[in-house]
Image (tube, rainbow, N blue to C red):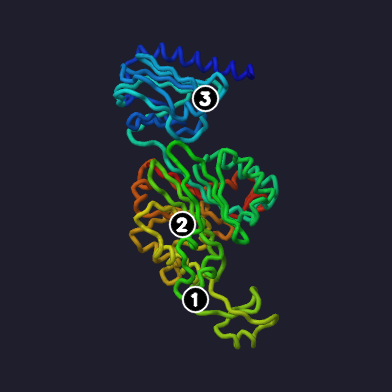
Amino acid sequence: MNIVKIAKHLIIIIILVFSLDSCTKESNNMMDSNQSENTGLCIYLNGNSLEYYSDIPIAGFQFNHNGCVTNASGGDASSNGFSISSSESAVVGFSLMGNVISAGSGVLLQLDGTVTSNCLSNFVFSDANGVEIDFEINSSPCQSLSVMTWNIENFPKSGLLTIEHVASTVAKYNPDIIALQEMPDNINHDGLTLLREALSDYSFVFDQNSFISLAFFYKESSLLEYVDHFDMVNSLNVDQFNGMNIDNIFLRHPLTLHMRWHGEDVFIINNHLKCCGDGAIQTELLYECDETEYRYLTSSECSANCSMGDCFSTYDEEYRRLLASQFMETHLNADDKIIMLGDLNDELTDDQADNVFWDLLESDNFIFTDMSIAEGNSDYWSFPSYPSHIDHIMITSPLESSFNNTESSIEVLTVDLEFMNWDEYDFLVSDHRPVFIKLAY
């Protein structure tokens, strides 16, 4: 065994023992704890399960009780090889092998007995260096669900530098679920393989049925469980919508990740809608002879003005995005807990006549959580080079109370500020910023 690891964890044990000795002189219980404002750990007693949500790996813990705990075992402490000891007045957990409970969330351990929050007190947690971790105690479940959506343009556009930055960003914000757009169309792509190795704490699902693919990374815990993933359009067995072939509406079929959070089903839908357009919705079939040429209402008018090639028919990009939005409004079960996100390639703040999301915005069943960002300062938009805010996170009404919780948040991550300027970020990583949501339970 590594002698450094032994030394570190002996320090942790010493800290826990001395903390235990000093803590027995105090009378505060679980609900009276007065903790530092700079907390990295939250704990919550859910029945006989002691749950946690931590930004910091946990290497050791201890707490007092008044005799209410008859035994302590299981949970992520046992899964990570911790030795757990319980006595008539205390519980201690640590690993002499150097193991830690990774940053994230789950059930720390199960407590036997008639356990209430009032009978537990004097908690101490330590990190891998033997340093005590500041924490807070919640009266409600403290495992938030954190989700990031990020269009990583033509991944990996600058090879290893792109991969390293994506991995470091994920490590910094530690989302439970990551939805990515513009991934390679081959699951065996070297860049994708290296990213999966760099994000080894995450599991991975991938859709390689399109020319730029959709992907999810997700991290399971005692409170967040993978169920399934599927192509949303194929699962509905829909070929057309409002007279248009579904593959013209969705060039990339939405990829759905089915998770179970605190035992309840949650569906996360990763979307990448058709880009570009002139800002106006045109429902007619149009004609053009080259993407750089003007569009015409008739084939003959197009032929008469075409400077190169043959005319071909096409649909307006805004119209396709409008139909995609209407498809979602029609086919999503608003009674389910659903998060629809991704590069939706249009703005939320357009006037009604040209707003492709109008049906969703007008419905009481759907909430765009990033509306305040769309209406706010352009410095914080997801696509600042235009500038525009086109990467969105929408939820169904059963998640509205979670989003309205004061512990929830939504933000565009200004990861480009870590670079010399926007152009450098755009060259090395992407032309989009990630959008990050945290939903309190």
Residue 22 vertical placement versus 284 (above, below)? above
- For mark 1, what is the residue? 282
Q: Amino acid at mark 3?
A: Gly
Determine which quarter of the picture holds residue 154: bottom right
Q: Residue at x 52, y 39 (%)?
A: 174
Pick whichever, 161 or 188, lies toward us.
188
* Quarter of the N terminus within the rendering: top right
Residue 416 placement (x, y as % from top left): 60, 48
Estimate the spatial distance between the alpha carbons at disc 2 and disc 1, rounded to whole Å: 24 Å
Determine which quarter of the picture holds residue 134: top left
| Circle 1 residues within 10 Å: few <14, some 14–19, many ≥20 | some
Mark closest to the chain's N terminus, 1 or 3: 3
Estimate the spatial distance between the alpha carbons at disc 2 and disc 3, rounded to whole Å: 46 Å
Disc 1 on helix, strand or loop?
A: loop
Mark closest to the chain's N terminus, 2 or 3: 3
Pick whichever, 263 or 326, lies toward us.
263
Q: Amino acid at mark 1?
A: Gln
| Tag shown at residue 81 | 3
Residue 331 placement (x, y as % from top left): 41, 63
Residue 388 placement (x, y as % from top left): 53, 59
Of badges 2 and 3, the one in the foreground is 3
Q: Residue at x 39, y 62 (%)?
A: 361
Q: Residue at x 63, y 40 (%)?
A: 198
Disc 2 on helix, strand or loop?
A: helix
- For mark 2, what is the residue? 374
| Tag shown at residue 39 | none
Residue 421 placement (x, y as % from top left): 64, 49
